[in-house]
């Protein structure tokens, strides 16, 4: 089972502003909590990464969206190229770390010229398979489910919520963002018919495991889980947990003591 959220290994610091001019203009939040050293051989180029995804450490895959988000922010500002040092300062990681991460997938930069921003962003999109649209099923249409269904951030992304489900009969038929809430009994058949491979669970924790099992039966391969419980799913299903309370609990350790 590919589960569990990444551990938090330190505080997220803002970039100091004393380095690159890019920092002064675009000072992004650091992604330090994901930026651990990557073990293993770094000499291998991964022409075959698509056929052997397990060869790439999961922590590297988790960092790629941070890289592409930063690159696209630079593209929006009509910046054409960036050095690994400048990119590293924006993100809050070392240039060596960026080079090591990208070396799993090929060679992208040119010595003395840095990275072509548009090209690198496009390549990372391709690596993450963000160059296509992914339909998503959302289960659990309480207040949290409604908030997720109404989240505007999905619209410019590669993900589109196409089906809503809830186990409460009184919610069936309700319209949310032009989608009709369906009974949970329709979940398996709908996912199979529409080829939905991604699911979001926003149910109470007592229903989360049962919902995950229905999703697995429907053919799910990736689950974003908001319920505060660790799901048990087959090895081929990737799970990411989002638990705000646990995240807060992991940060209070770093708050200055009186």
Image (cartoon, rainbow, N blue to C red):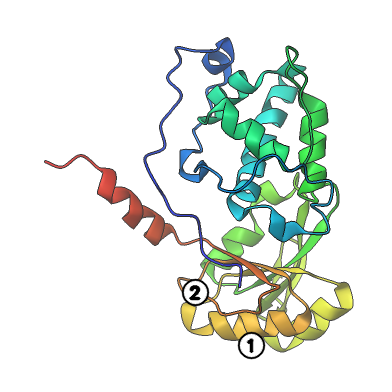
Place of residue 85 in the rendered image (x, y in percent of width and height, measured from the top left): 59, 20
Residue 167 in sight in this render: no
Q: Circle 2 is placed at which residue position?
A: 230
Place of residue 95 in the rendered image (x, y in percent of width and height, measured from the top left): 58, 26
Question: In this rendering, would 115 be left or right of 48?
Answer: left
- The residue sitting at the left extreme is 258
Question: In this rendering, would 102 be left or right of 129?
Answer: left
Residue at x 68% of width, y 72% of height: 237
The disc at residue 169 is 1
Residue 143 in sight in this render: yes
Residue at x 46% of width, y 44% of height: 33
Nearest to the observer: residue 171 or residue 119: 119
Helix, strand or loop at mark 1: helix
Mark 1 crowdedness (10 Å alpha carbons): few <14, some 14-19, many ≥20: few
Q: Is residue 5 above or below residue 117?
A: below
Nearest to the observer: residue 29 or residue 60: 60
């Amino acid at each position: 089972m590919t589960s569990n959220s990444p551990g938090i290994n330190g505080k997220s610091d803002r970039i100091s502003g004393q380095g690159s001019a890019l920092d002064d203009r675009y000072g992004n939040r650091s992604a330090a909590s994901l930026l651990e050293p990557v073990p293993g051989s770094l000499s291998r180029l991964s022409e075959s990464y698509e056929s052997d995804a397990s060869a790439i450490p999961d922590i590297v895959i988790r960092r790629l969206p941070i890289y592409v988000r930063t690159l696209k922010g630079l593209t929006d500002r009509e910046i054409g190229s960036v050095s690994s040092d400048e990119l590293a300062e924006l993100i809050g990681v070392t240039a060596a770390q960026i080079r090591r991460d990208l070396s799993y997938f090929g060679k992208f930069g040119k010595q003395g010229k840095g990275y072509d921003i548009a090209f690198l962003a496009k390549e990372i999109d391709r690596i993450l398979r963000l160059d296509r649209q992914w339909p998503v099923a959302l289960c659990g249409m309480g207040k949290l489910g409604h908030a997720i269904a109404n989240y505007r951030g999905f619209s410019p992304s590669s993900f589109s919520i196409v089906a809503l489900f809830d186990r409460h009969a009184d919610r069936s038929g309700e319209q949310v963002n032009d989608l009709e809430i369906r009974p949970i009994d329709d979940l398996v058949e709908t996912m199979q018919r529409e080829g939905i491979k991604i699911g979001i669970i926003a149910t109470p924790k007592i229903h989360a495991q049962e919902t995950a099992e229905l999703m697995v039966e429907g053919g799910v391969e990736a689950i974003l889980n908001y319920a505060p419980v660790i799901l048990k799913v087959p090895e081929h299903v990737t799970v990411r947990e989002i638990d705000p309370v646990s995240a807060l609990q992991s940060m209070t350790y770093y708050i200055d003591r009186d």
